[in-house]
Image (cartoon, grey):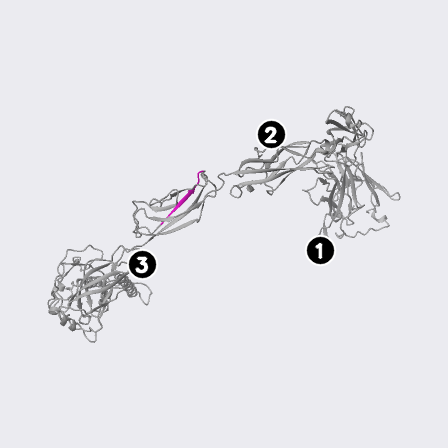
Amino acid sequence: MRAALALALLRLCLAKVNLAPHFFDNGAGSSDGNMALFSLPEDTPVGSHVYTLNGTDPEGEPVSYHISFDPSTRSVFSVDSSFGNITLIEELDREVAEKVVILVTDVNDQAPRFLQEPYTVQIPEDTPAGSSLFEVHAVDKDTGSGGSVTYFLQNLLATQFTVDRHSGVLRLRAGTTLDYEKARVHLVTVVAQDGGGQLRGAAAVFSATTTVTVSVEDVQDVGPVFVGTPFHGCVYEDMVPGSEVLTVVAMDGDRGKPNRLLYSLMNGSDDAFDINTTSGAIVVTQSPAQLRREVYELQVQVTEVSAAGSPAAQATVPVTIRIVDINNHPPVFYGESGPQTRFELSLFEHPPPGEILRGLKVTVKDADQGSNAKFALQLVGLGGAFRVVPQTALKEAQVTVLTENSAAIDFEKFRVLTFQLLATEVDTAEKFSATAHVVVQLLDTNDNAPQFTSPHYVARVPEDAPGGSTVVAVRAVDVDTDPWGEVTYFVYGPEADLFQVHSSTGVICTQPWASLDAEATARYSFHVRAEDAGGRHDLANVTVLLLDVNDHPPQFGQSIQEKTMVLGIPVKIEATDLDAEAPNNLVDYSILRAEPASVFDIDARTGQIRLKSSIRSLDALCNITHNGDCTWALEVQAKDRGSPSFSTMAVLRIDITDAETLPWTSMDTFLTQTRDEPAKAMGVLAGAMAITVAITALVSTATFWHKKSNKVLPVRRVLRRRPCPAPRAAHSNWLKCNRTEAAAKFVLKEDPPSENCNSSLGSPPAPRAPMPPPLPRVAPDAGAPLSTVPTVSGSLTSLQPRGSPKHSASGSPIQSALVSELRQQFERKSRADEERF
């Protein structure tokens, strides 16, 4: 049977009690801690170890454990005072209990609460680091972990204090000290937080905060300090013995609990002065007429008296006392030769701040004594360019003027600076004063660099300008005076070789040997440097743009050219002009003369030549020419648009034929039309050949595809070599005019035929051979479509210059070697492709 235990008191006893120890709360069901919710079966054998008490002391002192029971109950447990082990010493019998204890499970629904707030503590400023200062205490009505409370500071990094997380003991952090003179009060925020628990099915943690006000108490660790030093006093000639001259003031450096201070005179008084020991007032003990010195240097000592009445720290201070008479003299300015009211000196501009005006030697004197001779010095004018030292003086002072604002002392703004020195009495009713005029002649220094009037200069020069021509004049200004204001110019840069600059005027010219060419270089860019005698400089960029001059005439590729014109299709001539810019490089074309008659029009812009619209047949042309050979000689002019204008002439020989009389396919027409544009022809031919190869590959693949098995099976074919066909020739009646002479003008550069009649487009050209005679023209079948023959490029070589071109009845100028060669090579290529497949 489990006995009903009435645990009345569990307490900890310490050998030395400063702060209360506390138990560890290890939660319900634990075997050590504070016996919270402890239960025990009634059949537990006597002598069994049933629990272990566990606690700690904030100061680290040893802990002893004790247990007590209600007087009306049995003592069924014993405890080991050193280790806290609890042992069962009597049998338990649950059936004899008359009371039933019902345990209600706690939840964490209470927040910690600090007791006995507010917290205020006073500690001396010499408290050692690590000392315990105060203990805060918070309670949480919950049990278990929800009722356990831990402490921490809200701002751990910015405080001089620490707190024990279990006991709430506030300590001075190790390595830190307190100083009453720096901070008299510290506000420390402490947070109390419970151990957390379940609340309505969720984890909950509660906390509370409090502020501990730590007041620092002052201790005697600072000696006395005099206030208002230096101490100066005056004894006037009308004073009587016992009059107060001045009062020295001192105070204890420890402001919190200051000690009493006593004053005394150490030496220098010659019994002419005495001091009040408590107030520090110094009085004159003799008549001023009896005083033998004008100035007395006294030594005053102040001594702290502790609360016990014994002397403590001491301090001394000098005191100056002057004997003065009645104020009957104003201040007077003196120079090297006596009283003076005007001073002149020279000074270089922009002296460094704090520099002394060494050429100014001024002294101020006041013949009175004591306070009557005390005066203040100040500068009037210039708005803070200088300042005067000292600002106050007694009887006599050597005046020193220092530079205050270096920028205001500028030679370029003011050549002469004028200001006044004013000395005014301070402590007199009369306020006598004196004025001295100071004139400063400023000397120039090299404080300014040259400045170009523009950071970038652009010049435009004709390309035919002779060497030594002026390009542009640059200008830089230096506001300094001579020699610092003299500017020297230099040019430099990768493109400056062709130019030179006059060192003093800044005029940039071309080199005497320079030759400019806008077609070679149209733009030059380089730098010009302006430098004064001190090395200060400025840079500017110069860009020279060459203006194109019409110095190149148009040029034809050849002075004598030959063209073949198909009736209705224009031919084109072209000339180039090497000038750099328009309109000098723009060319206009015109026909100056045509033989035997003017039957052509020319496009002045493009150079395309076409027959006049009234010429519509080849017969009409043949009737015009001599011998009916349809050959014209044109004198063509190419003229640029420059000023002055240049022109060039070329002789153009044109053979005219009729395209309708030729058995040409559309490819023939295309070749003729693109004769002047070979790149276009090659592109079209390459595309056509690519399409042909692709179609051939598709047809070959389809041939080997078996429809039933969906497999590619080999097919045997008998390939027969076709004999090489004879070269095709045009019909002898292509043209009605005599063409034998025109056909003989060209020879075919053709590769020798191979064994299988295939020709390679990339093989080198064969030796020239006469063009084969043209074949008879066969009229095409009306029902059969005309075939289109792709062509490739060939080359033509003229046999001899044309004199008076004549045509035979069997030749044709249009059936040229170009068309013949292209047709033959393509036919060979086609036959080779057919035999291969």
Helix, strand or loop for disc 3: loop
Q: Residues within 10 Å of mark 3 (few under 14, many from 20)?
A: some
Viewer-side label of 3, 2: 2
Q: Residue at x 17, y 68 (%)?
A: 656
Q: CA distance from mark 3 to mark 2?
A: 85 Å
- Residue 337, disc: 2
Q: Quadrant of residue 23?
A: top right
* Quadrant showing the C terminus: bottom left
- The reply to whether dot 1 and dot 2 touch (C-beta < 8 Å) is no
Residue 97 as seen in the image, left or right of residue 585: right
Residue 814 image offset from top left, x and y in percent: 17, 66
Q: Disc 1 and disc 3: Cα gap in Å?
A: 93 Å
Q: Amino acid at mark 1?
A: Gly
In the image, taking residue 728 as reference, residue 642 lies left or right, namely right
Front position in the image: 507 or 666? 507
Q: Amino acid at mark 3?
A: Ala
Q: Return the residue nearer the eye: 448 or 382.
A: 382
Q: Tell me residue 189's x, y (percent).
A: 73, 45
Q: Which residues are magenta?
A: 524-533
Of pointers 3 and 2, the one earlier in the residue sequence: 2
As helix, strand or loop, the secondary structure at mark 1 comes to loop
Q: Position of residue 578 (x, y in %)?
A: 27, 55
Residue, far bottom: 782
Main secondary structure type of the part rendered in magenta: strand
Tell me if residue 712 is in the magenta stretch.
no
Crowding near the residue tagged with mark 1, few <14, some 14–19, many ≥20 C-alpha atoms within 10 Å: few
User: At which x and y percent is residue 592?
Assistant: 20, 64
- To which residue does mark 3 refer? 582
